[in-house]
Amino acid sequence: MSANRLSGPAAARRQEPLPTRGPLPPPRRRMKRGRATALLYLAPAVLLYTVFTVLPTLHTGYLSLFDWNGVTLPSFVGLGNYRLVAEDPQLRAAAVHAGILIVFFSGLPILFGLVSAAIVARHRRRGMGFVRMVLFLPQVIPLVAVGIIWRWVYAEEGVVNQALRWSGLGEQARAWLGSFDWALLAVGVIGTWVVSGLCLVLFLSGTQRIDREIYEASRMDGAGPVREFLSITVPLLRPEIAVALSITVIAALSSFDLIYITTGGGPGNSTVVPGILIYRLAFGGGAVGLASALAVVLTAVIFAIVLTLNRLIREAP
């Protein structure tokens, strides 16, 4: 009876091989399909980036070749605007101010973040999540609001002057943002306060991937905190340092909103930076072509500096 059940059309159907989907396409064709799919997913982002970044940048480069006030017909001057940019003493002063701000926006925050991350890596304590949140808070606050808050802090009756008077240093009280000698340094301190939290969070995340056994072995060999910092923490945080340098140098060289809210480039031209100068030329001086040339030069300088710094850090022994 069981033999009869396995015989006939039903048994023939059971013995037939299972259907297959056919032979797989060759590897080259599969790679082409994968690339096409990836490009399809990237297309919306590439389109937005092209419309809002690439095309405006190319248009700025085009405008830099003309003498134009933004209203009348432009006249072609070729590289004349770039020659004016190279010869303008006010631009050289703005470049010097931007270089000073690099120290406050990049150098001091990175140093603070590295030292703080090294301390945390050596002595982990509870509650560091709250500390990181508090230090990262300036990154969440809009820079316009930061500028307004620090204008109150630096005011004649602000927190800084009141603290100086309370500590017996009332003769040092001054209008910090209105001083030709101290305005740029006061703005730099604001930049240090804003960026330090970002650097600290970056370096703390980097220390979490460092094996704790490396620190324990160095302590067994008699290495102190300074040796650990220079020989372990700094070399192993090289990728995070490169990212922090890129972000902070760009923030220093392209700074506009913070200075515009706090000093407006004054008093006089003591806090003028390239971003403020571009704004003045384009919207106040009727020199859109010259402002565009300055913007192109600033973009090229930022790109060159960031690329050089990243290469030096990654190739360092």
Image (cartoon, helix red, strand yellow):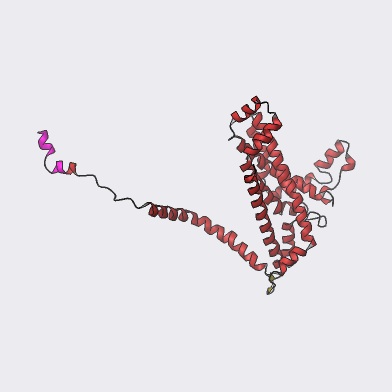
Is residue 8 located in the magenta-colored stretch of the structure? yes
Residue 140, visible in the rendered structure = no
Say left or right for 158 vs 221: right
Image location (x, y in percent) of residue 310: 64, 48
- Residue 316 is drawn in which quadrant? top right
- Residue 195 is drawn in which quadrant? top right
State which quarter of the image contains the N terminus: top left
Is residue 118 located in the magenta-colored stretch of the structure? no
- Magenta range is 1-12
Image location (x, y in percent) of residue 90: 79, 60
Chief secondary structure of the magenta portion:
helix
Going 12% across and 33% down the picture, which residue do you hit? Answer: 2
Residue 8, visible in the rendered structure = yes
Image location (x, y in percent) of residue 62: 64, 68
Viewer-side residue, 224 vs 271: 224
Image location (x, y in percent) of residue 251: 68, 50
